[in-house]
Image: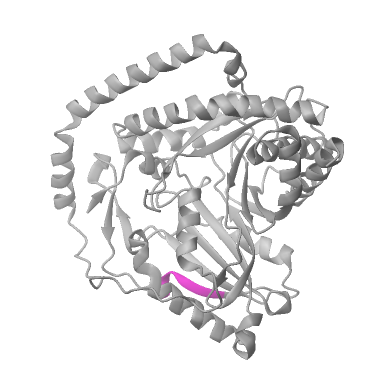
Amino acid sequence: MERIAGKDALFLWSETPTTLMQMAFVGVFDPAELGSSGADPAAVFRRFKDVLAARLHLVPRFRQRVIDVPFGLDNPYFVDDPDFDLDRHVGRLALPSPGGQAELEDLIGRMVSRPLDATRPLWDLVCVEGLADGRWAYVGRAHHVLVDGVGGNDILLQLLDLTPEPRDVPPPDEPFDPAPIPSPAAVLRHAAAGQARWPSRVAGTVKRTAEVAYDVARWSLSRPEDHGHLRVLGPRTFLNGPVGPDRQVAFGRLPLERVKAVKNEVGCTVNDVVLAITGLGLRAFLAEHGEEPDKGLVAAVPISIRKADDPAGGNQVSGMTVPLFDDVADARAQLEAVARATRPAKEQLGAVAAAVLTDWSEHAVPAVAAQAFRFYSRMGLARRHPPIANVTLSNVPGPPVPLYLAGSRLEAMFPIGPVIHNQRCNLTVVSYLDTMFLGAVADASHVPPIAGLVGHLEDAVKHLADELGV
């Protein structure tokens, strides 16, 4: 039995029927190198499942479920699932003809609109058949309490291989032998023992928070030119407001080499270019549907603080808000403004926010925290204040070499993040080989078809490159 850290439990508390805190990954594979067996969907699925079964012990969290403490007196706990059965987490589906991208997007939209089964470990995988030219897709969902974006990428790499022939993975040192689910009384006793240390932990948190506040104030006074732009709120648009339960999904591709050419010309980062692209694409999308904000849009950007030796599970992430300067007409000026906005935020505010949030989240009362999020959602309070950000944007570096799963070559990978309170759209980008693959997900009730947004984002790459002559 292991207590879930506050920073991870936040993703459980903030979940409501309309804001499911789950992430998804869609991989499209070509089984041609399997020869005749690659034409048999059943054989492909068996190979896929065999690889997963042989490597599941590399991710222990995937055999653990979440249990609550009675009366919400402490954070939930991870416990081994004594009824774990791989067949309950892995399945097969077939797309309707013609099995193109639109059909796959529609399927994923419906999948991420439904919650994971809370009585089991919070993940599932589906092998999707019926894509054009014999291709298949693997769709994995996992609750955010298990993993963040970078950690999810690390888990994915546990499944994938560098060659069509799967590598040998040593079996676990000990067989999986879960204990029974602890009784509510046992959970309460365990929680009470931890709560005895609560006063000393709070005192330490107050001291660390004061130290952080002093450091931020000193930094702010010494470098006022670096942080004035950080005090921003986004304009009101249809991208923000109360969120409905249904999701729509769209996939896109951005040419990595052209993005890098823009980066090199301006002297910024790939992430800065992605932010500028996002601003241009969103502004064009809003204008297409009759909204033209009178000021620039703002993105909420997760920042990974995961160290190289951190385990793949859990969340090691902070965040910042970044103005997108989409109201700046000159391409170079926009990119330079974005770069100026992101550097100090990453250097100072991102790490600070992570430290303070991690510390204080340990002292939240779970029952109160969960009810607060539900009250916010139920009362539609998102309508009553300007949005902190208009969109959530994540950019995760991916592998630059070809990868394989159960002998099938990975051709494309599309990540899907959660839609959160007051932000009806999430954009996630991951690079693989020479392409940045984009997964867009949005509230289906309040946001127009986001395939149009993806088209504007793809056009924005060409616009920036053409404007800069690269």
Q: Could you tell whether 184 is left or right of 397 in the image?
A: left
Q: Is residue 240 above or below residue 203?
A: below
* Residue 412 located within the stretch drawn in magenta: no
Q: Is residue 410 above or below residue 214?
A: below
Q: Which residues are magenta?
A: 87-92
User: Quadrant of residue 384 in the image?
Assistant: top right
Q: Is residue 39 above or below residue 53?
A: below
* Residue 143 locus on image (x, y percent): 44, 53
* Residue 82 locus on image (x, y percent): 26, 68
Question: The N terminus appears in which quarter of the rendering?
Answer: bottom left
Q: Could you tell whether 173 is left or right of 285 in the image?
A: left
Q: Front-most of 463 and 414? A: 463
* Residue 264 locus on image (x, y percent): 72, 39
In percent of the image, x 22 and y 67: which residue is there? Answer: 178
Q: How is the image coloured?
A: one colour
Q: Front-most of 5 and 325? A: 325
Q: Front-most of 345 and 96? A: 345
In percent of the image, x 47 and y 67: which residue is there? Answer: 159
In percent of the image, x 43 and y 69: which residue is there? Answer: 89
Q: Could you tell whether 331 is left or right of 440 in the image?
A: right
* Residue 88 located within the stretch drawn in magenta: yes
In percent of the image, x 73 and y 50: which residue is there? Answer: 257
Q: Could you tell whether 469 is left or right of 314 in the image?
A: right
Q: Is residue 387 visible?
A: no
* Residue 46 locus on image (x, y percent): 49, 82
Q: Is residue 380 visible?
A: yes
Q: Is residue 408 above or below residue 469?
A: below
